[in-house]
Structure formats: structure tokens, C-alpha cells
Image (spheres, helix red, strand yellow):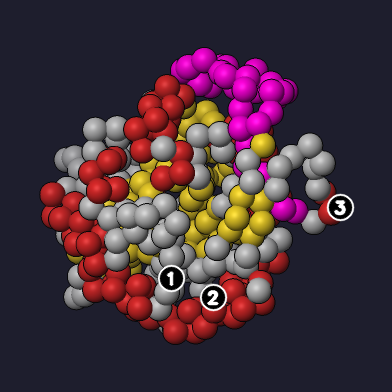
Amino acid sequence: MRVHSLRATTSSSGLSSFSAIYNGNNNNNHQKYLGTVPSSISRPHRGLCIQCGVQFRPCIDIHKGKVKQIVGSTIQDLKEGSFAPVTNFESDKSAAEYANIYKEDGLTGGHVIMIGADPLSKSAAMEALHAYPGRQLLLSSLHVGGGINPDNALSYIEEGASHVIITSYVFNNGQMELQRLKELARVVGKQRLVLDLSCRKKEGKYAIVTDRWQKFTVVFLDEKIMNFLATYTDEFLVHGVDVEGKKLGIDEELVTLLGSHSPIPVTYAGGVTVTADLERIKAAGMERVDVTVGSALDIFGGNLAYKDVVSWHVQQQALAV
């Protein structure tokens, strides 16, 4: 659980440099959610965000109607000569069954991702939302992503999603379409919007990637861009694409970047293999970055016990009280 206070600012400092990236007009009157950080790097002009413990955020990845764990960087558009994505695991359990598990364990803010958003995957996602609905704003049950746009976003909210997750609709042809982001925020409300800022290293910086993580944008993840985008969204979701699904360990540099500069709740995904990785994320993210775990979990065919991760999560909440 996190409690935020909102403070309006009128400063346009640092925003004009984004004009070459965004297809839209910047508004100088931005409201910013601002995070509690250690006093050594606190910024006195900012508002206050109280975070109550690092959280484990569960996931349900759906491909062609089945719950799977796929190496995201291997997903391509279906076309002649393309290779099938690398699948680490395919479950015999339905998406709804996983949603029920998470509900019973009291886990909130989980991510249901439709890989491809085909009819079978949409149906499975809806079943998961029905199993664990979060229609009230204060109940962050499941967040759903994959093919989200202004025409369908509200339908997922109505079916039980507490938030919708967006990426490719907003980041189009390598650019950021600010008007599209504004429209989504208008349709569902920023309090129900999660912006996926999954990224890959390029020339020493983290470039946001879209279209099944195959296309680099010209937008790089840093303090200014996170502060700006926080105006329009409730949370960030960030996959470290270079390590995601490969069980090679976390991208600690990326976690540090998120912990240092994200002004709103942020969840990191990618590379968790053992319980010690959870503690590394907690430390590198200064206890401000939540974590999701996929392929490594035993419920997805891995070696890391799901029950141990849930126990770690419960311990973090107890420490924060």
C-alpha cells in the first residue's frame, strides 16, 4: 500500500527539450507524484510519496490463450521466415486459476499481459479479471496489457481490471505520441493507467522499446522523462529486456536508475533467479522498486519456490508497518 499527496507545480524546467520527441504540445502546468528518497538525495520542492514496503507483483503472461513464459526479446511479428519465440514454460493451468492463487495469497497489482492480444488470449485475460476483480479504485487487483487503446481500455476496467497497461499505442514509429497518452488518461483516468517503459541498452543508455520489444524508440529512460510521464500515469512497469526471461540475474544498473528517479510506483521485471535477487532489487532500488518474477518461479517451471517469494513479500510488508 502506498499513500500519495499531490502538489501542483508550474515549472517548465527541463520539459522543453522533449519537443523533438513528442508529437504534441507540452503543458507547463504539470502535477507530479514525488517519491520519498533518502535525505541525502531528497528534493525539497517536491511533494511526498509514502511507500509501505517493497512488494512482489505476480504476473500472468498469455499467448494464444495459454499461460506461458516466453523470452520476450524473441517475440516477433508473425510473417514468413520468422522464428517461433523461445518458450520457457507452458502451463496446464488457466489464467483464471493463477488469478485465484494470487487472490488467495493477498497479492495485489499483478500484471496480466496478452502477448499478441488474439481472441483466445483476450478471453483468457477476461477470465482472470473475473476471478480477481478490482473495480474499486483502492483495490489494485490485476493490471492488464496488450493491445490497449482508447476504444477498448474501459472494457477491461469494466470487466475487473484495476489498471490498464500501455506501450506500443503511445510509442509509435519510434516516437512518443503525447496526444495518444493524454487521450488514454482522459478516457480511463491517470489513476487507472500504467505505462510500460521496458527498455534495452543502446549506446550506454536505456532506450524504451516497443512492438514486442523489437523496435527501439528515440526516448531514453532518465529522471526527466520519468518526471514528465508521471503527469499522465499512476505507475510504471519496466522490463529489463536484455535479461528478461533468461534467468541470468537482474539488471542492477536499471533498478538503481528506477529507485533513484521514479516519482511514482514502479515495478521492475527481469532476471530474478534466486531469493537473493529480491534483496538486491530492494537494496539497489532503495526500497522504492517493486518486483515481478516469471520464469524462475516453480509455478512457471523454474526452481524458485513461489511460496518463498510470497513469504518474502509478507515479510517486507511486516517490516514496513
Measured Cα–Cα span from mark 2 to mark 1: 9 Å
Mark earlier in primary sequence (1, 3) = 3
Residue contact between numbered discs 2 and 1, judged by CB atoms under 8 Å:
yes
Q: Which mark is residue 93?
A: none
**In the shown orientation, is residue 125 left or right of residue 74?**
left
Q: Amino acid at mark 1?
A: Leu
Question: Residue tagged by mark 3?
Answer: 40
Residue 113 drawn at (x, y percent)? 32, 54
How crowded pointer 2 is (Cα within 10 Å; few <14, some 14-19, many 20+) is rated as many
Q: Which mark is residue 313?
A: 2
Q: Secondary structure at mark 3?
A: helix
**In the shown orientation, is residue 87 left or right of residue 121?**
right
Q: Secondary structure at mark 1?
A: loop
Question: Residue tagged by mark 1?
Answer: 107
How crowded pointer 1 is (Cα within 10 Å; few <14, some 14-19, many 20+) is rated as many
Q: Amino acid at mark 3?
A: Ser
Measured Cα–Cα span from mark 3 to mark 2: 27 Å
Residue 266 drawn at (x, y percent)? 55, 52
Q: Nearer the viewer, residue 45 or 257?
A: 45
Predominant SS of the magenta segment: loop
**Up-down relation of residue 154 to residue 257 (above or below):** above
Residue contact between numbered discs 1 and 3, judged by CB atoms under 8 Å:
no
**Quadrant of residue 286 within the rendered picture:** bottom right
Residue 257 drawn at (x, y percent)? 67, 49
Identity of the residue drawn at 61% across and 27% down: 30
Residue furthest toward the left?
119
Residue 119 drawn at (x, y percent)? 13, 49
Identity of the residue drawn at 52% across and 28% down: 218
Identity of the residue drawn at 25% across and 48% down: 158
Q: Amino acid at mark 2?
A: His
Mark earlier in primary sequence (2, 1) = 1
